Amino acid sequence: MWAALRVEFSKFYRHRATYAGFVLLLGLSGLVVYAAAKDARNHERRAKAEIQRSLGGDFIVSGKIMTAAFVPRAILFAKLPVYVFLAAMVAMAAGGAVATEYSSGTLRTLLCRPVRRTYVVLAKWLVNSTHAVSLTLFLGATGLGIGYIFLGGGDLVWIDMQRGGGFQIVPELEAIRNLTFAYLLQGLSMIAIASIALCMSCAVGRGATAAGITVGFLLLSGMVAVMPFESLEKIQPYLLTTHMAAFEHVLDKAPDWAEIRKAVLWVSGYAATGLLGAIVIMGRREIKC
């Protein structure tokens, strides 16, 4: 098992394409910081007006609102960077883990050695899970780091327009701690996506197809989760994207920890199901030396 794991880590991080995701996420974080810095004055004016309105207009609001902690919070709130951009990169990496090696003949050579197929799948799953969590934390860390350079530090001031315009003022260190926890939980979501992509990689012969099926599943899950139909409301509590969204509530004033724990269990179940499916399919697939 350890030998298979060392081989997989070596193969995975030897490819230059592995680092393309980190470069793209760095560019995304830089783009968000650039937009935040350009719009800082207008955003602070609107934010202060909204806070004054919420307080009844009897207070004078001053100080800095656009800070470094705003950037990783905004990336999570936007959903698109995590649900599509980050998820697609995780799915592409895990989707090619087996399918690409199968089509090139590398997997056939590997399985000619005295190594169990289960160990090979577990090694690939561990490597891709590590990669998925690394990408997720890298996205938050680069957003925060570049934000400190161009926006500076300070408390997190967040106005949630989708929930009646309520606002939060969170001390800087507490905000960073809560954001780290939220990104770790989203890292668990990325492990679930990597697991599904790995399962598809074992089932189909092309990495692009496996990644496409995984991203398509995620997009379909996301669309069904927000459709206002009673017939779909029965399945919405079981969707992956429903529980991914629950992780954002870590940043609420009073997080619903019962709901967050429930989401952790469901996302972990998706990850375990994907891994188990990959092991079963790999074990039954005919691969001759």
Image (spheres, grey):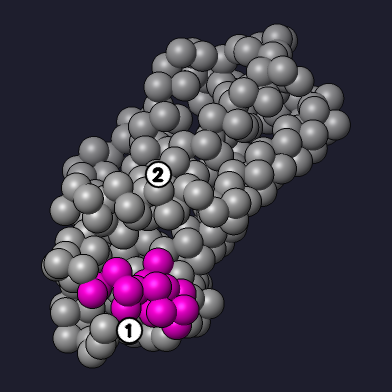
Q: Residue at x 46, y 37 (%)?
A: 137
Question: If the image is split into quadrants, where does the C terminus sit?
Answer: bottom left
- Residue 138's mark? none
Q: Provide the secondary structure element on which disc 1 rests.
A: helix
Residue 29 or 127: which is nearer the viewer?
127
- Residue 133's mark? 2
Q: Position of residue 77 (x, y in %)?
A: 55, 45
Pointer 1: what residue? Answer: 203
Q: Residue at x 22, y 50 (%)?
A: 3
**Is 166 covered by the magenta stretch?**
no
Q: Is residue 7 above or below residue 75?
A: below
Q: Provide the secondary structure element on which disc 2 rests.
A: helix
Q: Residues within 10 Å of mark 2 (few under 14, many from 20)?
A: many
> Quarter of the image holding residue 286?
bottom left
Q: CA distance from mark 1 to mark 2?
A: 24 Å
> Quarter of the image holding residue 65?
top right
Q: Is residue 20 above or below residue 249?
A: below
Mark before the other along the chain sequence, 1 or 2: 2
Q: Position of residue 198 (x, y in %)?
A: 34, 69
Q: Residue at x 31, y 59 (%)?
A: 124
Residue 149 or 202: which is nearer the viewer?
202
Q: Is residue 173 above or below residue 10?
A: above
Q: Is residue 33 above or below residue 269?
A: above
Looking at the picture, which amino acid does disc 1 mark? Ala
Q: Main secondary structure of the magenta part?
A: helix
**Is 99 covered by the magenta stretch?**
yes
Q: Residue at x 23, y 38 (%)?
A: 257
The magenta segment: 97-112
Q: Position of residue 172 (x, y in %)?
A: 51, 14
Q: Is residue 208 left or right of residue 119?
A: right
